[in-house]
Amino acid sequence: MLIAVVSLITPAFLKPINLGNILAQTAVIAVVAMGQQLVILTRGIDLSVGSNLALATVIGGLVYQQVDSAIVVIVAMLLAGAAVGAVNGVVFVYGRLPHPFIITLASLSICRGLALALAPGHTTMRGMPDAVTAIGGGTTLGVPNSFFVVAMFGLLFLILTKSMVCGRWIYAVGGAPNAARSMGIPVKGVLLATYIISGFCAGVGAVLLAGRTAAASPIYGNLLELDTIAAVIIGGASFLGGRGHLGHALIGAVLIGVIRNALNLLGVDVFFQMIAIGLVIVIAVEADVLRNHLEARARVLQSARVQ
């Protein structure tokens, strides 16, 4: 419905070049949102993904200055992202923190500070291997290569969550942690794995963004954590955990991309775009609360009929 309305208001929206831009611009949000989705499924949250992405690009840029190898640069960014996720998971799970908000908020600040400290001159580093720029900024048959990366990871996550036991454990841990523990599910291991995967996805996002811009910067990923959380919630997942399909994160990412692109085409100021996204988040969260309330009422009525 949104796409139909926007295409009527601004015909330029449906031009192939513009649709390609939307896919390229939403690729980073989409791939990082998939990792965020797993964390939210376990009733958690990862506020560090934006700063983690920035730090990963800086590490990739520093490695590229020493070694002109696309594989080494990509591996460095992926490992950097996964390492931050591992730290988040270990501190949250084994540090017995009451909520992951605390450690991921701390990581948000720490990673951003590290990125600024490590970047020469605290600014952008130009240059990336050709293979990286091809992945993040190239096209195949007019379709951005980053779209194929998102599709590949989407397929992997779909297999994980729908066809593998460990994927079902994630839903069990988020839906009823105590029951999952009593069933013998390794709750701590599941939680740790979700934060590592979330960090790894931030590393993948770093590869895509560094490739699209052919640069590394400590200021990349600003407010990305809000975009990914918004994508998951707008798509229909629940903050209460245990509910949400992978497609929710992808749909939410595309919705954010379409909204921003439409507002750009209409000449709306960037500050009002931020307000619009914020309002959409509020509406999505309220819709989730209303849905849970109505479902609870429906269960009570169904129970009364059975009795």
Image (spheres, rainbow, N blue to C red):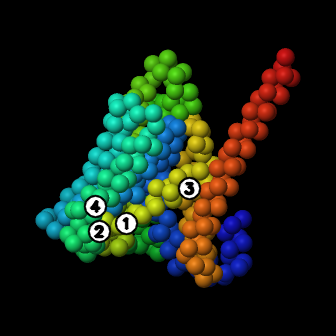
Instruction: Using the image, tell me which numbered label, if any, was put on residue 220.
Output: 1
The quarter of the rendered structure image containing the N terminus is: bottom right
Q: Earlier in the sequence, mark 1 or mark 4?
A: 4
Report, in whole angstroms, how far the alpha carbon at label 4 lies from the one at label 3.
25 Å
Question: Residue at position x 23%, y 66% from top?
Answer: 119
Report, in whole angstroms, how far the alpha carbon at label 1 lies from the one at label 3.
18 Å
Q: Earlier in the sequence, mark 4 or mark 2?
A: 4
Question: Residue at position x 66%, y 82% from top?
Answer: 11
Identify which amino acid the numbered label 1 is placed on: Tyr
| Label 4 neighbour load within 10 Å: few <14, some 14-19, many 20+ | many
Identify which amino acid the numbered label 2 is placed on: Ala
Residue 51 at x, y = what percent?
A: 36, 57
- Is label 1 in a helix, a strand or a loop? loop
Identify which amino acid the numbered label 4 is placed on: Ala
- Is label 3 in a helix, a strand or a loop? helix
Based on the displayed image, in which of its 4 quarters is residue 94 positioned? top left
Instruction: Using the image, tell me which numbered label, if any, was put on residue 230.
Output: 3
Identify which amino acid the numbered label 3 is placed on: Ala
Residue 158 at x, y = what percent?
A: 50, 45
Instruction: Using the image, tell me which numbered label, if any, was put on residue 115.
Output: 4
- Is label 4 in a helix, a strand or a loop? helix
Q: Is residue 161 left or right of residue 122?
A: right
- Judged by depth in the image, the label closer to the viewer, 4 or 3, is 4
